[in-house]
Image (cartoon, rainbow, N blue to C red):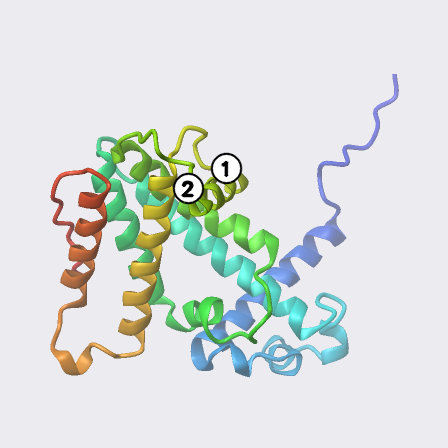
Amino acid sequence: MSMSANTEHPTRRERLRRQTIDEIKQRAFELVDADGVNDVSIASVGKAMGMTPPALYRYFPSRDALLEALVVAAYADLGSTTATAARSKVRQDARTRVALIAQAYRHWALAHPRRYAMLFSDRSRGVPDPPDGIIAVNQGMLPLLAALGEITPPSSADGTTPLDEALLRWGQAIGAPADITPTALRLGVLAWSRIHGLVSLEIAGAFDSMGMDVALLMAVEIETVVNTAGGQRVSPDFSG
């Protein structure tokens, strides 16, 4: 019997192409981190790579294609960071997982403020998130929803309003637990909006003149969400 070629292993040319694409994205991220996404162009990345723009177009046909790849990669990193935080300890209850997820989200945003801005504020209005990016960031949302689902009591009234129905459709679309309630889904969205709002204001320096410890403010917000979900009081440590 003759052996057919194993098509699962990439060829040397394919490996080199992937390595080049990874390096292009790395150089582009360095530009984002230094000056923001608006300074990223095919020419600027090509200069950082030591490549001419026509050579770079062989890997990314346009600036928009390059930015889409950066958005997907950044969402994936953020989602992976929060998902890892949710399983970072062998023994932890759902309330603790909510706090750890929020903490990881904030720390990632503060460590990568310009990447965070790229995801949520600095791109052109009306440009939708790439589907792969949505899938990637939802890997961080799902553990939050699962944790809130564990501490949210069931409600026979769930699913009776247009908002409930929309939440259930969204939860099903992203792969949330099948038995999750609209209440848990709503709290997940509200928790994210509170975390995002505080982090965005913190990055912008809005709290600097107030002399306020944003870590403590974040802890109070998460405590409020957990209490609303039916859990006990929690005082997560957001220092650092």
* Depth order, front residue of 232/203: 232
Q: Position of residue 142 (x, y in %)?
A: 41, 42
Residue reaching furthest to the top: 1
Q: How many marks?
A: 2
Q: Quadrant of the C terminus?
A: bottom left
Q: Residue at x 60, y 62 (%)?
A: 69
Crowding near the residue tagged with mark 1, few <14, some 14–19, many ≥20 C-alpha atoms within 10 Å: few
* Depth order, front residue of 99/23: 99
- Provide the secondary structure element on which disc 1 rests: loop
* Proximity of marks 1 and 2: CB atoms separated by less than 8 Å: yes
Measure the alpha-carbon separation of dots 1 and 2.
7 Å
Q: Position of residue 218 (x, y in %)?
A: 20, 60
Q: Position of residue 163 (x, y in %)?
A: 43, 47
Q: Residue at x 53, y 81 (%)?
A: 38
Q: Residue at x 71, y 39 (%)?
A: 9
Q: Quadrant of the N terminus?
A: top right
Q: Which residue matches tag 1?
A: 175
Q: Residue at x 34, y 62 (%)?
A: 196
- Provide the secondary structure element on which disc 2 rests: helix
Q: Which residue matches tag 2?
A: 142
Q: Quick one: label 1 or label 2, which is nearer the N terminus? A: 2
Q: Is residue 74 left or right of residue 217?
A: right
Q: Is residue 69 above or below residue 176?
A: below
Three-letter code, disc 1? Gly
Crowding near the residue tagged with mark 2, few <14, some 14–19, many ≥20 C-alpha atoms within 10 Å: many
Q: Position of residue 123 (x, y in %)?
A: 53, 74
